Amino acid sequence: EVQLVQSGPEMKKPGESLRISCQGSAYSFNKYLINWVRQMPERGLEWLGRIAPSDSYTNYSPSIQGHATISVDKSTSTVYLQWNSVQASDTAIYYCATEREYDTLTGYHNWFDSWGQGALVTVSS
Amino acid sequence: QSVLTQPASVSGSPGQSITISCTGSSDDVGYYNYVSWYQQHPGKAPKLLIYDVSNRPSGVSSRFSGSKSGNTASLTISGLQAEDEADYYCNSYTSISTYVFGTGTKVTVL
């Protein structure tokens, strides 16, 4: 069974840098993209972006493009979401979720099948 | 990038059926059959209920079903149960290779 374990809660001041992580286990890491989804306090889900560990392909939502970066360390099966300078508006719970890569037998898999437990990020002065 | 529009809340009595709509555009819901639905209980991570408009993953109750017409997708919960009380979100892949979620619907079991 796919498992995604996320890093713990973070408390930062505006302008500080931050990196949160999502480590995958019990599956072939290269065969699943990792997506990041955030949920602001008392708000809905918002897709932020994704990365394909197989080739480090990334794409981002316009809402986060240029403000945060998604990266991968295949040696530890870990995906990161990082900011150089966080803002109060980055306060949210961040989830990572798997999306199986396209394959010739089963085609596209444009959904999120397994989710991490979530990581609370609080940005406040 | 616009979000998909869902009703803020839907309610029903145990045993009844309810339907949640998810309205997008020809650039997302209407572009592909890549609509999925997620259930989220308070304090928990979302859980996949439906993928590719109408398919259920293994382990998801057959009381949950999905459909689509044009730019609007729908999730129907039949035989409503107390445990179905949760937030529900639709999601669609888009014509620019991104994803977009719906605004979310709170389901209340009366």
Image (cartoon, coloured by chain):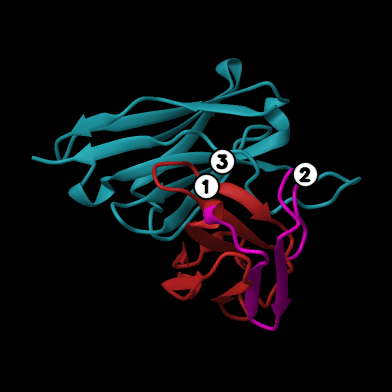
Residue B66 screen position, x and y as percent: 71, 67
Task: Kindly give the residue lying farthest to the top in the view shown.
Answer: A75
The residue lying toward the viewer, choosing from A118 and A15, is A118
Badges 2 and 3, same chain: no
Label 2's element? Answer: loop
Crowding at mark 1 (Cα within 10 Å: few <14, some 14-19, many 20+): many
What mark, if any, has residue B46 been given in the picture?
A: 1
Residue under label 2: B58
| Residue under the image location 41 percent in, 72 percent down | B8
Residue A17 screen position, x and y as percent: 25, 32
Instruction: Give yes or no for residue B42 being in the magenta stretch.
Output: no
The residue lying toward the viewer, choosing from B44 and A28, is B44
Please, what is the three-letter code of the amino acid marked with disc 3? Answer: Ala
Q: Colour of chain B?
A: red
Can residue B28 be seen here? The reply is no
Badges 3 and 1, same chain: no
Task: Kindly give the residue lying farthest to the left in the view shown.
Answer: A125
Residue under label 3: A97
Q: Nearer the viewer, mark 2 or mark 3?
A: 2
Task: Give the residues in magenta.
Answer: B54-82
Disc 3, disc 1: CB below 8 Å?
yes
| Residue under the image location 68 percent in, 66 percent down | B78
